[in-house]
Amino acid sequence: MNLQQVRLVVIGAGNRTNKYLEYAVRHPERLKLVGIVEPVEIRRTLVAEKFGVPAEACFSSFDDFFANPIEADAVLIGTPEDKHYEPCMRSIEAGYHVLLEKPISQTKHECLDILEASNRKGVIVGVCHVLRYHPYFMKIKEVIDSGELGEIISINHYAEIDIDRMMHSYVRGLWSKASKTNPMLIAKCCHDIDFLLWICKSRCRKVSSFGSLRWFNAKNAPEGSAERCINCGVEKSCPFSAVHLYKERKQWVRNFDVPEGKTLDEVLDVELERGAFGRCVYHCDNDVVDHQVVNMELENETVISFAVNAFTRNDFRGTHIKMTHGEIDGNETILRVRKFRGGEEKVYDFSDLCGQPFHAGADLNIVEEFVNNISRSNSGCEFSSTIASSIESHVVCYEAETSRLTNQTILID
Ligand SMILES: NC(=O)c1ccc[n+]([C@@H]2O[C@H](COP(=O)([O-])OP(=O)(O)OC[C@H]3O[C@@H](n4cnc5c(N)ncnc54)[C@H](O)[C@@H]3O)[C@@H](O)[C@H]2O)c1
């Protein structure tokens, strides 16, 4: 099949967008970056230089871009989630196909609006639920779909968020306030709920959830602590110290922009003194939970329990699927498949893939599928992670939040 090159504009040229753009680096004949919208000059310039995007196709705001649209087939939206809805709706209305970072948006109604608009305009809106494109999670789906283990009866699934990731992202960082981004269940775990619904192929009819911001708040601040780690009397023994995390261990430092002529240490010194990432974890303005559980019952009577845990050094997802004729359990490294009768236990070893860049290739796989589908979009959409197939995970997450906040089990219509 003769697939045409897809012309792409990116809105937001941060961490995630740069991951997806690696596909254009490796397959320039399939994907060409033709426009950039990014308010931070250093990021805009770096990406423009890397891909040879001319100055007239670089914009510092999406208002400017939509006022002077350029010829392109698709838009990749990699902005923070409070800036998904507007550029997504405007891209759809302008007739572009869209690859949209998860979470889709910030409310159930906005997600449904995007679905309606994409149907009305007949454009593909793909949602970056990258687990669907990750070899380990694809293997789980393949085993279930083969039918050799019968039907799913119940699932225990958990997402372990390493404590450093928790501090950086959900206490001090970008995803620490639900009003600014989303509740943690949606920001982080829409991936998990999407994966669970994807493998079960059944809709959720009941959901309940519990959880709270139990630890990272002012009432747990130790005596002698200060608003900033650099001034703190107990910094040397605190497991959550920003000085220790960034300056000494150099963890999670890749997202700090280092302007030309400066060093990373100089940037970190300023951040620790004045920036959001130098704040004491007990004195931030965070309001998202630090632990949560969700229970679901599906239309086919499968039951699922899911937990998100942040007080751990683990950073992976674990899943145990109990089926009528066997079971599957795994932790992203080892996947075990056991049949109750007949057949050997099968063990799949994914340790070589663990920690591999681009989500073990999933980021590139999703772009490839998106690009292939756009190239042949006249023949119908085969893209797996469309808005239509992704939206239920978001609805379930929003209803789980309602349950957590109202102490009720929610029936999903
Ligand atoms: N699929 C995944 O596994 C995954 C993983 C992490 C993050 N995400 C999601 O990806 C999105 C981006 O996260 P990130 O880690 O790349 O963040 P980031 O901060 O590195 O990148 C976001 C970029 O958007 C830019 N931006 C902000 N406002 C803008 C505007 N009005 N117009 C254009 N650009 C604007 C920022 O300057 C920044 O460069 C978020 O929605 C996040 O939840 C998805």
Image (tube, rainbow, N blue to C red):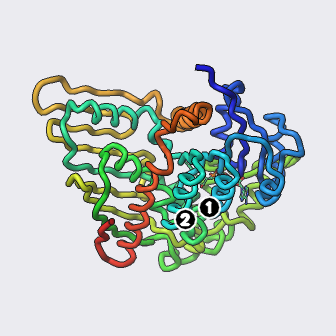
**What residue lies at 48% left-to-right and 43% top-to-bottom?**
385
Q: How far apart are labels 2 and 1 at the CA level?
A: 7 Å
Whether residue 363 can be seen here: yes
Query: Is 112 or 81 nearer to us in this picture?
Result: 112
Q: Are marks 2 and 1 in contact (CB under 8 Å)?
A: yes
Q: Nearer the viewer, residue 286 or 273?
A: 286
Hey, which quadrant is residue 168 in on the image?
Answer: bottom right
- Asked if residue 329 is positioned above or below residue 117 in the image, the reply reads above
Q: Residue 345 at x, y = what percent?
A: 20, 27
On the image, the x and y values in percent for residue 170 come to 54, 62
Q: Which mark is residue 120?
A: none
Residue 240: image location, x then y, percent: 54, 61
Give the total of numbered labels. 2
Residue at point 28%, 61% (across, down): 205
Can residue 364 be seen here? no
Residue at the far top in the pictured view:
1
Crowd class of label 1 (few under 14; some 14 to 19; many from 20; radius 10 Å): many
Tag 1's secondary structure? helix
Q: Which residue in the protein does label 1 denote?
A: 85
In x, y percent, where is residue 290? 45, 65
Residue under label 2, please give it. Answer: 110
Q: Tell which circle, 2 or 1, labels the residue nearer the N-terminal end.
A: 1
Q: In this rendered view, identify the residue nearer to me: 359 or 401.
A: 401
Q: For residue 295, which quarter of the picture?
A: bottom left
- Left or right of residue 49, residue 14 in this image: left
Which residue is found at the position 52% from the left and 61% from the top? 111
